[in-house]
Amino acid sequence: IGKMIHYQETVESTQKIAHQLANEGVQEGTLVVAEEQLSGKGRLMRSWHSPKFSGIWMSLILRPKIPIHEAPQLTLLAAVAVAQAIEDTTDLKPQIKWPNDILVNRKKVVGILTEMQAESDRIHSVIIGIGMNINQQLEDFPEELQEKASSLLIESGGTVSRSKVIQRALFRLENLYELYLDQGFMPIKDLWESYAISLGQVIKASTVNDTIVGKALGITDSGVLLLEDGKGTVHSIYSADIEIQ
Ligand code: BTN
């Protein structure tokens, strides 16, 4: 992972470039990194604030030979790798909010966006976009984000080396990806659960059509979140916005 790196100072979105490169057939493990994104993309059609030199904005191209419904497992894998990289480079204690927000002291420092290209039933490529807030000060965030978002600098009280964090993130991604190809999702699931913030708690999941409040029971073997509502019905959540109650 990261043997081929496509670096550009300013891009619209590293996700977009990664999609193009994937279509051109670049090798698995190719990484796209930029210093700044002019229209960074977040989950659920949101934008992602990606100011120059203060974060890590990168997209990784993988080509696993797995069925389409298992692709979300890779998102959870990426979240674990990034949490490990934060532990490797700071004294902070990262936690993961399903599916893949990384929080430090309950504030979001990392977002992950996984997109897939598939032909009929075969995965052509999985593009994992990782946005890490590293050295922003609080006032660098748009006002509406200041309550919920943070950076490693704000939480640790000192500048954090972006190159060290990238190095550790790639190292951890490669290790976990090899473990995954070798032993499947189970060891990754265990690791993910050890970082999970909301398991066993009551959370609110807002999906496109619905809001469900219930206890987060855990994740399934394909990475789907299970929520038990007040009546004891268990819901499978594939994609939602989660609020911890
Ligand atoms: C989220 O909404 O939490 C996901 C944010 C993902 C942001 C990263 S930054 C690198 C890559 N390029 C993008 O345009 N988005 C992802």
Image: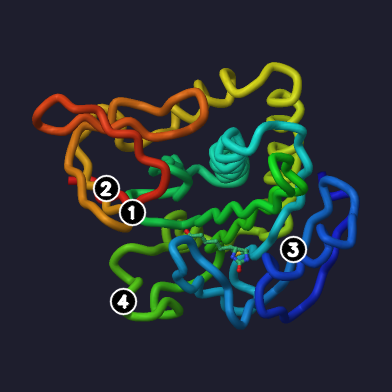
- Return the x and y of residue 223 as percentages of the image width and height: 48, 32
Q: Residue at x 48, y 46 (%)?
A: 100
Q: Residues within 10 Å of mark 2 (few under 14, many from 20)?
A: many
| Number of on-image labels | 4
Which element is circle 3 on? helix
Which element is circle 1 on? strand
Q: Amino acid at mark 1?
A: Asp
Using the rendered image of the protein, determine whether residue 47 is visible from the camera's viewpoint.
Answer: yes
Circles 2 and 1 in contact, beta carbons < 8 Å: yes
Which element is circle 4 on? helix
- Return the x and y of residue 164 as percentages of the image width and height: 71, 52
Give the residue number, with chain letter if any, for mark 3.
19
Q: Amino acid at mark 3?
A: His
Residue 125 in the image: above or below residue 66: below
Q: Which mark is residue 241?
A: 1
Q: Residues within 10 Å of mark 3 (few under 14, many from 20)?
A: many
Q: Amino acid at mark 2?
A: Ala
Closer to us: 100 or 52: 100
Q: Residues within 10 Å of mark 1 (few under 14, many from 20)?
A: some
Q: Quadrant of the N terminus?
A: top right
Mark 2 and mark 1 lie on one chain; the one further toward the N terminus is 2
In three-dimensional space, the C-alpha distance between marks 4 and 3, rounded to whole angstroms, equals: 30 Å
Q: Residue at x 41, y 28 (%)?
A: 219
Quadrant containing ligand 1: bottom right
Q: Which mark is residue 205?
A: 2
Circles 4 and 3 in contact, beta carbons < 8 Å: no
Give the residue number, with chain letter if any, for mark 4.
144
Closer to us: 79 or 86: 79
Mark 1 vs mark 4: in front: 1
